[in-house]
Image (tube, grey):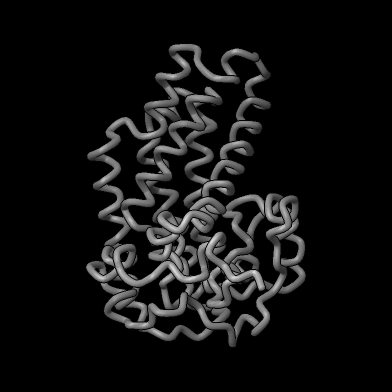
Amino acid sequence: MNELIVNNEVTIRLLAFFGILLLVAGLEAVFPRRRLRLSRWLRWRGNLGLVLLNTLVIRLLFPAALVGLALFVNEQGWGIFNYYQLPFILAVIASVIILDFVIYLQHVMVHAVPLFWRVHRVHHADLDYDVTTGSRFHPLEIILSMLIKFAAVLVLGPPVVAVIIFEVLLNGLAMFNHGNLRLPLGLDKVLRLFIVTPDMHRVHHSVHDNETNSNFGFNLSIWDRLFGTYIPQPRDGHEQMQIGIHGFEDQKQVAGLGGMLLIPFKGKVGEYAINQRNWD
């Protein structure tokens, strides 16, 4: 079974990506949370163009990708889970949880370091918030994220299946919690005890800097509660809150592929970067 999953990793990930993309997009059309400011065609053309570019960059720079490294690490017997033998299921669960925590820390880091915030601004500069926002990242951030995940796999030595599950969950839940979805409030309240919901993560895309620097989780919601970065609701309400970051309101700059690629090199860092904020 494990070998079957590993051999079909690319197919599994592609099916999961397009399946979740179409499902969330369909639900957005039926149960929208907010009225969109820009045309879907304009934003999707740029956001999905960025996804395609990032896929080509990763395949060019890291042909074996994360799963290939996990295979190599396990063959060499490197990492914590190869040194300390755990039951397979426990090793898989622990690996997924730890890798998710690494992504939480990475997310905090790109908000804290001004240089990394410049690159991460591409994600936050989207003027609307929907399923495609979850995959909207500058190629430089994708490369940085891949290197961090490589380091985590080298240290952990996780089962290969755990890496595949983690990657599918990361991409799938990122699309879900960036969805322009109106979930029943009771369902949202229960779900956010365990995973990040659209209403929870939407706070993170507010133009207000304290809200931008909150709710960093992508998968598990526990990290924000544990480390004091959790804000339950946006101060302006979900329907009225402004999405984006100050200084990036030009549609051509924030929605076109060329404009998005240049965002890291334009303007000042401002007070969004955590260690640049005026805490007074």
Residue 22: image location, x then y, percent: 43, 63
Most foreground residue, 151 or 272: 272
Residue 7: image location, x then y, percent: 38, 28
Most foreground residue, 246 or 232: 246
Quarter of the rendering containing residue 135: bottom left
Figure label count: 0
Let me know if residue 185 appears in the view.
yes
Let me know if residue 132 appears in the view.
no
Q: Residue at x 27, y 33 (%)?
A: 63
Quarter of the rendering containing residue 117: bottom left
Q: Residue at x 42, y 54 (%)?
A: 116
In the image, 45: left or right of 187? left
Decide: is 14 above or below 164: below
Decide: is 279 above or below 154: below
Q: Residue at x 38, y 78 (%)?
A: 248
Residue 202: image location, x then y, percent: 58, 70
Q: Residue at x 30, y 43 (%)?
A: 58
Q: Quadrant of the C terminus?
A: bottom right
Residue 94: image location, x then y, percent: 65, 32
